[in-house]
Amino acid sequence: MAESRNTVLVALVANVAIAVAKTGAGLLTMSSSMISEAAHSWADTMNQVFLLFALKRADRAPDRTHPFGYGKERYFWSLLAAVGIFVTGAVLSIMQGVDALLHGRGEISSREYLISYAVLALAFLLEGSSLIKALRQLDGEAKSRQRGLVEEIRKSPDPTVKTVASEDSAAVTGLVLAALGLALHQLTGSSVYDAIASIAIGVLLAWVAYALGRDTKEMLIGEAADPELRLDIISTVTGYDGVEALVGMATMQLGPENVLVAAKIDFHDGLTAAEIQNLAGRIEVDLHERFPTITHLYLDPTEPNVMEQTVAADLRRLVESQADGSPDGRTAAIGQLDDGSWRSESA
């Protein structure tokens, strides 16, 4: 939480400085791409405020009205940030570019070009620093989960740092497009290139907003926990001698560091009620110790019906497929959990 807050604060400070500089340069030169970049930076600034608010709200303890806590607040405010990127950044950039194509722009003096290039260089430095900070955090989290940086960006349950990294990546790319548009405008004397750069920046921001909104929406409506964690839970539970089978499991990502797990377990018939209770307690302690992100755990001893017996057999095959400990076997098992192909057709 503290590292995510620091990442957002770095991005906020950088975006405020950049937004002011870009706005001044855009009003001075009336460059379409520069004005688009200014709108982008102001959108990013507001988004950082949303993300800081999300971190504060999500940190509240569970209470009577929210027994599972407030972790999903981070997903809600991150979704608003994605909407902000689309409306303030993408739409305004495209509108600015289209207007420039239809009506053109006046000539820009050499001095105004120089100011624009200086502002873009400053923005590149500040945005790059913020991006490096976000990527370092993601890289550390990726290493802790033993996966690559790109995979971590795609699968991370932390929308805060993912949003910052996505925004900054789009910002750095947008700066390159803006500089290219300005340079072509200067070389050819035609503002068409500047306008095209503005539209390209808008399209880029629209894609980033869509990708962030899609991922955040899945978390907000109750996406399952990471398939790697689910596989580890299944392997742990089915590894106990007194467990006949795991006949069903449902998980939900309540927040970046909060997971709900509900599992139905078929214990050996020979166990007494006291022995089942004792074994369930050991499993619960074991899971909490191995996987600290499991903050809510419910184990249900059950006698499986026909459908649940099929599910249990499928889960048993899934565990056995990676029992040799090979990376390929584990990767295949995770992939089956991720896409749902572990279920047999009869299930």
Image (spheres, rainbow, N blue to C red):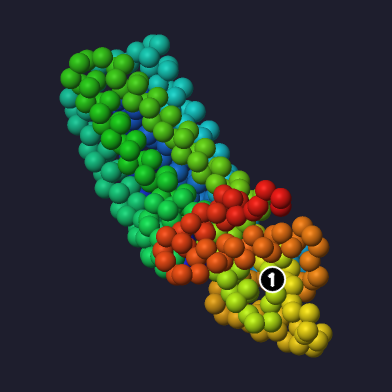
Q: Tell me the amino acid under the disc marked 1.
A: Ala
Horizontal arrangement in the rendering, residue 298 relative to residue 217 (left or right): right
Left/right of residue 166 with respect to residue 222 in the rendered view: left
Relative image position of residue 321 (x, y in whole percent): 52, 63
Q: Against 270, is 167 above or below?
A: above
Q: Residue 307 location in percent, x, y? A: 77, 57
Q: Which residue lies at the image location 50% right of the left edge and 41% below the top edge?
A: 211
**Label 1: element kind:** strand
Q: Quadrant of residue 261?
A: bottom right
Residue at 61% in and 46% down: 217
Question: Would you call the spot at circle 1 few (<14 residues within 10 Å), some (14-19), or many (20 or more)?
Answer: many
Q: Nearer the viewer, residue 230 or 52?
A: 230
Q: Is residue 307 above or below residue 277?
A: above
Residue 276: where, in percent of width, then height?
A: 76, 83
> Given the current orientation, which residue lies at the most extreme top position?
103
* Image quadrant assignment for residue 44: top left
Is residue 91 something one can see in this rendering?
yes
In this view, 291 is above or below 54? below
Q: Residue at x 47, y 63 (%)?
A: 330
Is residue 253 visible in the rendered image? The answer is no
Name the residue carrying label 1: 245
| Position of residue 16 measured from the top left corner of the image (x, y, whole percent) | 40, 47
- The residue that appears at 33% across and 47% down in the rendered structure is 127
